[in-house]
Amino acid sequence: MTYAEGLAQVTDADFDTEVLGAGTPVLVKFTAQWCGPCRQLKPVLGAIAAEVGEERLRIVEMDVDHNPLTTVRYGVLGTPTLLVFDRGEPVRSLVGARPKRRLLEELADVLEPSRA
């Protein structure tokens, strides 16, 4: 796992450990360098990460062009695709960029402190 501009970068090689083995929910942004909406979403996700904290939701990125195994494994067909994993299982899938407020609304149940 590496860090670029604030969001951790995961790869095919470390996905199982960093995402599926995480003790907290993890939002994976499947992205590509050439994707305009992906670039628009990056500061939104950075703001959410700063606001909610890594203990409630970890946010990472995966470049689809350099990590085809995981991209195919989860059926990612477009970018940006956001997949939320909790306890090693995908629990939410969102496709496309959206504003911070809407994204927080769509993630509200994942961010609930009372989820057990």
Image (spheres, helix red, strand yellow):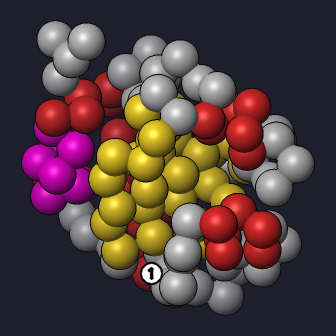
Looking at the picture, does residue 26 appear above or below residue 55? below
Q: Which residue is mark 1?
A: 37
The residue at the point 45 percent across, 70 percent down is 81
Quick check: 41 left or right of 75?
A: left
Furthest toward the right, the residue is 13
The residue at the point 31 percent across, 53 percent down is 92
The residue at the point 23 percent across, 64 percent down is 99
Residue 43 visible, this orientation: no
- Residue 108 in percent (x, y) is at 15, 38
- Residue 55 in percent (x, y) is at 44, 15
Q: Main secondary structure of the magenta part?
A: helix
Residue 73 visible, this orientation: yes
- Residue 86 in percent (x, y) is at 42, 33
| Mark count | 1
- Residue 98 in percent (x, y) is at 26, 69
Quick check: 94 left or right of 64?
A: left
Mark 1 residue crowding within 10 angstroms, few (<14) / some (14–19) / many (20+): some
Pick the front one: 51 or 110: 110
Instruction: Write down the region rendered in magenta.
Output: 102-108
